[in-house]
Amino acid sequence: MADDPTKKDATTPPPGGTEAGGTPPKSSEPAAVPPAASAQPAKPAEAVKLPETAKPADAAKPAASPAAPAAPAPPTAAKPAAPGAAAGAPAAPKPAPPAKEAPPKPLPLDNELVQRFKARFGASIIEATLDRKQAIILVAAAQWLEISKYCRDEEKFDYLADLTAVDWPKREKRFDLVANLYSFPKNERLRLKAHLGENETARTLIPVWPVANWLEREIFDMFGIRFDGHPDLRRMLLPEEWVGYPLRKDYDILTQDQAWVKENLGIESGQ
Amino acid sequence: MDPTRHNSTTEIETTVLGADEIILNMGPQHPSTHGVLRVKLKLDGERVAASECIIGYLHRGVEKIAEHRSYQQFAPYVDRMDYVAAVSNGLGYCEAVEKLLGAEAPPRARVVRTILTELQRIASHLVWLGTHALDIGALTPLFYCFREREEILKIFEKYCGARLTTHAFRIGGLQYETYDGFEEEVKRFCDDFAHRIDEYETLLTENRIWLGRTKGVGILSAEDAIALAVSGPVLRASGVKWDIRKAAPYAAYAQYKFEIPVGKTGDTYDRYIVRMEEMRQSRLICLQAIENIPTGAIMARIGKVLKPPPGEVYHAIEAPKGELGYYIVSDGTTQPYRVRVRPPSFINLQAFDKMARGSLVADVVAIIGTIDIVLGEVDR
């Protein structure tokens, strides 16, 4: 088992947008991506060693000094009070961005990945966007299973991290079916979406990713979306006799509550 | 609530039983199910022929609640999902909302978050170790584990006033500065803890009974682990070297050196070894972090009323149980349009059936323990 091909090492991230589906980061957001890798250029090298008995006595002193200015400093003071040599580089641009930076918004995406999808599936790829540096591909629900299979086999998105839904009752097709994929070989994430109408069904993804079993049951439980080919589509978290689908936006909590109070307590609910 | 009313028509009940087959119901009130998990087992003699998990007894509709709260108001709710690792839940949620806003916590806040989250990982693994060993019959480790966990909870209590559901972090950074002596206390704990782990290992690692109860029990291959999308120590014990702290570093993890322990066979013993080693690595991360906590602000300037621009984000962190993801959709108002929590316990629990089939009844208890579930998170 130890040497099988699935034993992958995804621990070295490609520099920059690990979630961007291979696209370069948006140019207008300089501060958000690098996770403070540039901070403290000098110290980590020596901090890394950490022998068990590393300076037991005097370690307390250097550790205490950075905390000293902390006590009087008001928490929301925007400027880092007297940034030391270590914090100088990253601290300077910090306070500025939140105020002036353009707010993040979805942008159209057209990279190699999307082009490969379009070459293969044509009109079934409805839209590709980049939101907060995360790639999203909206596909036709009819091709949901085929495109998922392609993602796993050809594009190496071998891990279905999550499958869920969102309800937009005012839209013509009210449900978003959302699959968050991850690729171990590429260390990338990708989000697949499909729009579903109220009475439409989707093909089950269990043949592609067995994890979809419980996830689809939960979607059925919460949204009432049905999956064709699911072997065991029952409620997951709620009791079987539950009425309605709670995560739909038009789910009526009050009526349910009053009915429950009436039935179980035999009184009028005061709500 | 009558447990038999819950999902009564099941696959197991409707199948025709062989002459030696019986159905055994375990839970929802059973000391080794770690909460209110109900497992239905179809037994062929001593062997498990099939199993089914029935969950939902702790369902509180967390995702629905989120749609009726402001972003800040929802933050304390996430602590109540995985309630033995509340700090990790909070970190994931705060970072997800920060990403949605296009903001980022200041460096000092990120380092303090990292320290507290790693302490929480140790505390969570200690609960797992104590209860897991207890389920299998080793009584002693529980007392040792809770002794050390107490020290961590004391640090949390001093920092934010709460021990369990801490609400330690805020969207945009931290509300509280670290208290005087924070670094010393973390250091003292870490220094002590090195010997403590060795102590636990002398009790278990080469114990013949422990080996007999865990070696070769509940094997999950790497292919199955990926297909069932398990994550965290369960995935790594199957030999897949993947840790979100390395693959897509968040908080301040990119600054620190640590190893990712992996197993070979994916059995219960490997998962035990992986988690033990993870506690050592968490300890090293804490020690590196307290050496050099940056000075400066602890809160980003994000304003009091949060209205993230319309759009969506998926942010995942490496919680003690595995990949904890938040998928948040904003419609531009003060309340999230949709919050989806990707719960590691829920998805790892789905692999239970794969692990349990063919094993002995007595091993079922070991397998439930080794997945390390918290029902608050499974049911949400």
Image (spheres, coloured by chain):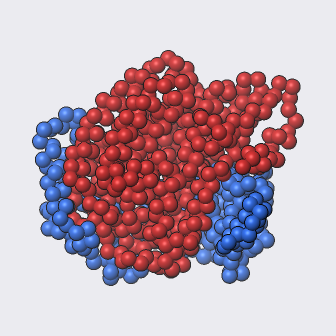
Return the residue found at the far front.
A267
- Give the farthest residue toward the top: B208
User: Which quarter of the image is occupied by the N terminus of chain A?
Assistant: top right
| Image quarter hosting the C terminus of chain A | bottom right
Q: Hue of chain A?
A: blue
Q: Residue at x 42, y 22 (%)?
A: B203
Image coords of residue A265 (percent x, y): 74, 60
In this rendering, does residue A21 appear at all? no
Q: Residue at x 53, y 54 (%)?
A: B81
Measured as percent of width and height from the top left, residue A180 is found at 57, 61
- How far across and how far down the image is residue A79, in percent? 21, 73
Q: Is residue B107 above or below residue B213?
A: below
The residue lying toward the viewer, choosing from B258 and B334, is B334
Name the side, left or right, on which A62 lies relative to A144.
Answer: left
Nearer-the-camera pick, B59 or B323: B59
Determine the image quadrant of residue A80: bottom left
Q: Residue at x 31, y 35 (%)?
A: B193
Q: Nearer the viewer, residue A66 or B161?
A: B161
| Closer-to-camera residue (A22/A73) | A73
Chain letter for the red part:
B
Looking at the image, residue A111 sits to the left or right of residue B160; the answer is right
Visible residue check, residue A250: yes
Whole-percent x, y for residue B22 in the image: 80, 29
At x 36% / y 26%, what residue is drawn?
B199
